[in-house]
Image: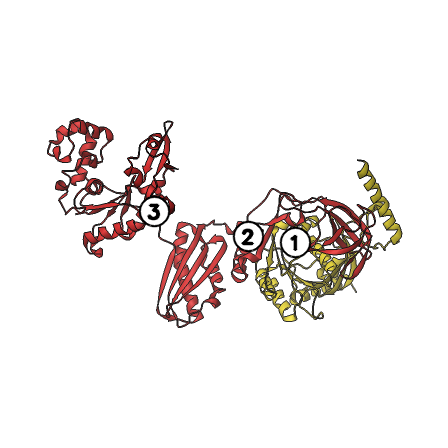
Amino acid sequence: MTAEKQEILAKLRTQLLEVQGFRPSPSATAQCFGLGEIESCFPNSTFPTGTIHEFIAEHPEDAAATDGFISGLLHKLMENGASTLWISRNRKLFPPSMERFGTDAQQVVFIDVPYEKQILWTMEEALKTEGLACVIAEIPDIDFAQSRRLQLATEKSHVTGFVFRKAPKRALSATACTVRWKISPEPTEMQDNIPGVGSPRWEVTLIKVRNGHTGTFHIEWSENGFTQIQSPALAQAPEKESEKQHTYHRILAEERGTA
Amino acid sequence: MKRYLSIWFPNLLCDYLAFKKPELKGTVYVFTRSERGRIMISAASREAENQGIFANMVLADAKAVVPDILAFDDQEGFAKKLLTRIAKWGIRFSPFVAIQEPDGIILDSYGCSHLWGGEEGYLKHILDKLTESGYGCRGSISDTIGTSWAIARFGKKAPIIAPAQQYNAILNLPPVALRVEEATYQKLHKLGLDKIGKFIQMPRSVLRRRFGNDFILRLGQILGTEEETITPVIVVAPYEERLPCLEPIRTKPAIEIAIEKLLESLCARLATEGLGIRSAELRGYRLDGQMTQTRIGTNRSTHEVKHLFKLFELKIALIEPALGIELFILTATKTEPVYLHQEKLWSAKPGLADDNLAKLLDRLAGKIGPQAIKRYIPQANHWPERCLRPALSLEEKTEIKWQKANPRPSELLNRPVPVQVTAPIPDYPPMNFRYREELHIVRKADGPERIEREWWMEPGEHRDYYILEDDRGRRYWVFRSGHYDEEKSAWFLHGFFA
């Protein structure tokens, strides 16, 4: 294939995406989330803003990991000072934790609705509002028609929407969401084998990507942002590790005793 | 021709206090203020006056008469405030009501009294109403402000002076009724001129030479030969619009039209005054005599019809017209100055100051309720449950930063859940713990981070927090309540880390 032909093909591909409703948001032309290989899975190799994402969390631990991952994404999305809406019922998210991921929780408005059925209405209203960075809704289930409505709302305003499905009751069916994520925690690693808990690490699974491809990746949140881990640490020999910890703690305890 | 009604409150402050504190009835009490190092009585109750205690006496002298006299502090300007309040109430009897400091009000009653069946009925009605609310008062109607003032205070005969009869009415009054200065009054007294009638016939030039221009002016004013004006109090009309309907309204589109019309006229008025609505109320009076009430509130004051209409639109379903609504009344119950933004500037600067966000939150508050909307700001407390508090407004900022030294869990349980823990040695992180029937073997741990309970707020044990990572890489926030004790130590799971 000649270079000319390839160029034509690339052009046609972007046109095809546009026809399918995928438009790169005008403001976020060069927004890089530092997600490494994950971003290459998306159409045009950019994190799709101005669309609906779906996060699946089966366990509370996964939900916490997803909270952390979303906080990390918000750090980038809210860079221009825009605010975010977090809609939920029975919210567990602890706002001070967002500071660790570079997101100022003061810029986040939490909507704690009393009934689950109000969540989608609130989200749609919020998605229609231009100027918001992101709208996150915690809801266990969403069907195709509902997700399509949300998708249409975002297409006008270019607000990014996250549907955070905690412990979905129904089996996962098709939705109009662009990406379906699953984040679960992974063992952390400290530099030079120092005992203790390191920076958060997650196994990020792209279950479904429209016009892209899926995959499983390993991501760590460090102070600079997301970093991709090529070879995740295997669980170390358990006895040895806990022994190490115990010696460290004994040292600390002795120090405290003498001091 | 003009007619004025003057009302005098001899014990204004004391009557007010007696109304507020009924237990004072029958006791001797006074208002005092300090003046040149002495405590002076500024107002005395009726009982005190019966005992011979009057205003401008020294409190110590009064105490010699009545030892258990009650003294209250006289707040500067309170009497004026009270008079203004009474004057505003009096606006229902006459469009022009003014206060006459320090102890009276005056109404321009011309053309008003016939509505109460003549001047006698008019005066009686007003005085009765005031007496009912506990004020001792006297009133008088005459052609001039001066005569009304004088008769109300010093008149011994009929309170109503027929038109053009003020000359005869004041002949027997003391010169103090002329509203002259203390020095002039003393001078008149010294000369034996103890009644106005004794000097009113004297040539003006003689009087002017002895008592000054002011005296002549007062004399002219009481007789009506000199002009005197009053400064009426102005009652601010409430921000209210009415819409009577030709036919009772029952349908949704009709209600929408009504709301839109009301909003348009109300907002036009607010816009000219630079005000915006913070909360508004729509009342609909129905055919069956019932009333429907709908309230809206906004996060930022606004007079934008479109936005306010949207807020009401969410509530239309709650308006029950029944047989039909005859009259709509829209009231702006709370207004605030509106800040006009340059649109370009704001659209380029998103965030909490964004107008779109405020509008969105208004709509959400209208549908779900304002208590659902929360924004958190850090608080200077270490106790995890108290390290943040809801912000009072969208704009509220604080100097306190979120704490960064120790990581906090992404998800915090509302109430810590007890867990079973194997922790062999004090101050060690647990080896394993059992949560929800599952055994978690701890692989990595951080801690302890001791958080002391804020004893000045609540009693209880301190907490030693550990960050634990189990064999599958899941991270937890676990704490031990109080000091280590092999049997009794209570362990809790409080959150999940990202």
Residue A75: x, y in percent?
Answer: 67, 51
Q: Nearer the viewer, residue B424 or B465?
A: B424
| Sequence-first disc among 3 and 2 | 3
Is residue B78 at all visible to an observer of this figure?
yes
Badge 2 amino acid: Asp
Question: Is B278 on the left-hand or right-hand side of B194?
Answer: right
Q: Nearer the viewer, residue A153 or A42?
A: A153
Residue wearing tag 2: B354
At label 1, counting other C-alpha atoms closer than 10 Å, the crowd grade (few under 14, some 14-19, many 20 or more) is many
Spatial CA distance of label 3 from label 1 is 56 Å
Q: Chain of mark 3?
A: B
Q: Which chain is yellow?
A: A
Q: Image point 87% across, 53% down: which residue?
A: A238
Is residue A80 at all visible to an observer of this figure?
no
Q: Which chain is red?
A: B
**Mark 1 residue element:** helix
On residue B85, the disc is 3
Q: Are marks 3 and 1 on the same chain?
A: no
Residue wearing tag 1: A77
